[in-house]
Image: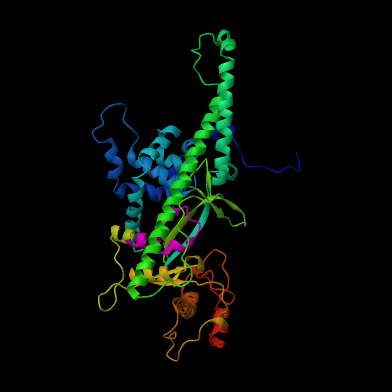
Amino acid sequence: MEGLKHYRAWDAEQSGRTAVSPREALPEDDLVFFLVDLIPQLELSPFHRHYAGELRGQPPFDVTMMVTLLVYSYAVGVRSSRKIAAACERNLAFRAIVGDDRPDFRTISDFRKIHGEAFRPLFVEVLRVAGELGMVKLGNLSTDGTKMGANAWRHKAMSYGYMGKDIQRLEAEVDALLKRAEQVDAEQDAELGSRRGDELPDELKRRTDRLMKIRQAQARLEAEAKAKADEDQRRRDEEEAQRARAGRQRRGREPAPVDPTPEDKAQTNFTDAEAKIMKQSNKGFDYSYNAQAVVDGAEQIIVSAEVTNQANDNQQAAPLARAALANLAAAGIERPTQADGMPQPIPNTADTGYFSEQAVEELQKMGIDPHLATGRQKHNEWPQPTAAGEPAPTATVKEKMQHKLRTVAGKLCCTRRASTSSSRCLGRSNRRVVSGSFCCAAWRRSQRNGN
């Protein structure tokens, strides 16, 4: 028939019978082949240790294969055990790892639970390989974090003040149900049949379980409040001891005694007790965790990663740097040295959320050269440097940090690879100094203005 377009031949029956090899179908530089070659070279003895001396039952799946499967799954964003098992049947990259002997979702889930702690040293092993390949330069470490939503509904939470009221209400309801049960025992005897008759009524069991959960949540809040009170008291005692050594008197009124009782508005979640309410990027609030990472600037290699339930980044700079240095030492990556043989301070950039005078001091003690943004501040408000180009001797830690940011901004602008993330221009704010995506025009403008 004229006018009809001719298409390439397609035989659905033949296509369904064609054998496909992952090595032939996938690109040579695919991530899965890199991991298949890399993982067997890592130290996996913590995984093998679990099976040492266990001779009963069927042979388990190969440990190296299971580790490779989970590492690749997480690398491509597949975390559910069921989705991983389904991908092992349908996805060529996953088939390249497991072949025809595919683990089911329960096996994958159990392996993850059993070897949860063994995955921690695997991070250091990967960092060691990256160091041997020259991918960790330590020319700049960037620190940043993001809020990750917890699997906890915010309406499944309760405040400490409301808990007391709800406990009283539930106790009264439980008592009423017990009295009602005693009254109708005789009437129910004929209906019990083969049952023993000592089971709790569903309505009573439901209220009893809820009462137990509320009391457990109340105890958690009280324990958290007591720990916070102990820390506040310890800090007060240290400040008082410092004043006594210096011979100074306290100014103003004596502070109120530390109260270990939780505030009425203190909340906890019944689904995930460790998750905390945090502000989200959409300006709302939800139960989340604060995921933190320290990244080497050369090849974007993560040298430290932690998850905390503290919403504020202010207390995270020093612990993250300490963990990064520990991981680098465990991986055998040596720090650059100066001409005199001493370790060279490692630059560490971070946004204004990490800045505090205490954080700067702690980072400097660890041999870290902090470049922390200090907030939204215009360049013409920055302190003027002396003739020698250094900040004034009387400058505060914050003023010195602002001067340092100003002097290194141009170098970062011209030498660092632009970040793919959105960033504010240096001419408007130094809030996102961590990204390194600075505007050359803004830098030249600040230079002409003498800032």
- Find the residue positioned furthest to the bottom: 387
**Residue 123 among magenta residues:** no
Residue 284 vs 402, above or below: the answer is above
Q: Report whether residue 107 is seen.
A: yes
Q: Is residue 398 above or below residue 62?
A: below
| Quarter in which the N terminus is drawn | top right
Q: Main secondary structure of the magenta part?
A: helix
Closest to the observer: 50 or 416?
Answer: 50
Residue 139: x percent and y percent?
38, 70
Q: Residue at x 31, y 30 (%)?
A: 59
Q: Where does the image place residue 137, in percent across and percent down from the top left? A: 36, 67
Horizontally, residue 119 falls left or right of residue 162, namely left
Residue 300 in sight: no
Q: Quadrant of residue 183?
A: top right
* Part of the protein shown in magenta: 306-325
Q: Is residue 5 left or right of residue 250?
A: right
Where residue 382 appears, as percent x and y from the top left, is 53, 81
Is residue 220 placed above or below 190 in the rendered structure? below
In terms of depth relative to the viewer, which is nearer, 170 or 290?
A: 170
Of residues 258 and 101, the one nearer the viewer is 258
Closest to the observer: 358 or 351?
A: 358
> From this viewpoint, which residue is outermost toward the left?
53
> At x 37% / y 63%, what residue is drawn?
237
Q: Position of residue 260 (x, y in %)?
A: 45, 52
Judging from the image, the colouring scheme is: rainbow
Task: Work out whether 150 lies above or below 104.
Answer: below
